[in-house]
Amino acid sequence: MGHFKYASDVGAPVEVAFTYTDNHQFVPDWAFGVVAFEPIGDSDHGAGAVFAATLRVGFWHPTVECEITEYRRNAVIEYTLRRRRTGKPASAGSELCVITLRFDPLGYGRAVLTSETDYRTPPGLTGKLWSKLLHAIVQATVGRTESQLRREIEEFHGTDLVGRIA
C-alpha cells in the first residue's frame, strides 16, 4: 500500500469547510480528474452513501464506486473507491484507494484540512516496476486535489487563506 498525507490551513471555519466538502454536487469542482459524481440509491451523504464517480484519465472515462465509509459531522469524511464493472456493483476486496479528509479547528474562523490517501500498488514484479510511476502520479493528483479543495472552500466562504474578505 502507498500512503500520502497533506495538511493545510483553510481560511474558513470547520463547519463551512465540512459543509462544502460534504455536498456531493461540488466534488467534480475540487477532485482532480472527477467529471461526474452521482449518488447511487437514496442517501447522498453520511456513512454508507454510495456514489458513481466518473473519472477522466486521458480519453478514458472509467466509472468507479465511491462509498463514504467514515463520517463524523464537522470532523471526518472517508471515501473508499472500488472498481466497478458496467451495470454491476463493486465487489468486496476491489478497493482501489481510501481517501480521508479531516477537519480540525485552528482558531478564529480557520481550520486545518488534512488529506490522507492509502492506495493499492499492483502485486508482483510488474507492480514493483510500476510502483514509482504510480507513486508519482498519485502524489501529484492528491496534492492538486487538496490545494483545489482548499481554494474552493475559501471561495465558498468568501475569504482567502488569512481570513480576509475576498
Image (cartoon, rainbow, N blue to C red):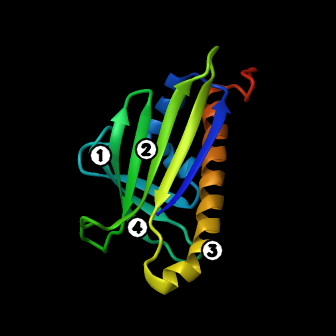
Label 3 crowd (10 A; few <14 / some 14-19 / many >=20): few
Q: What residue is shown with label 4?
A: 63
Label 2 crowd (10 A; few <14 / some 14-19 / many >=20): some
**Sequence-first tag of 2 and 3:** 2
Q: Which mark is residue 133?
A: 3
Helix, strand or loop at label 2? It is helix
Q: Which mark is residue 123?
A: none
Helix, strand or loop at label 1? It is loop
- Whether residue 33 sits left or right of residue 88 in the image: it is right
For the point 44% across and 27% down, the residue is 74
- Whether residue 139 sits left or right of residue 102 in the image: it is right
Q: Kindly indicate the quadrant of the structure image that contains residue 115.
A: top right
Q: Nearer the viewer, residue 155 or 71?
A: 71
Helix, strand or loop at label 4? It is strand
Query: Which residue type carries mark 2?
Result: His
| Structural distance between the alpha carbons of marks 2 and 3 | 30 Å
Query: Which residue type carries mark 4?
Result: Thr
Helix, strand or loop at label 3? It is helix
Find out whether the residues at labels 2 and 1 contact each other: C-beta distance under 8 Å: yes
- Looking at this rendering, what residue extends furthest in the bottom direction? 125
Image coordinates for residue 11, horizontal then vertical, percent = 67, 26
| Structural distance between the alpha carbons of marks 4 and 1 | 16 Å
Q: Is residue 149 above or below residue 64?
A: above
Q: Is residue 82 above or below residue 104?
A: below
Q: What residue is shown with label 2?
A: 24
| Structural distance between the alpha carbons of marks 2 and 4 | 16 Å
Image coordinates for residue 15, horizontal then vertical, percent = 49, 23
Q: What residue is shown with label 1?
A: 49
For the point 62% across and 73% down, the residue is 132
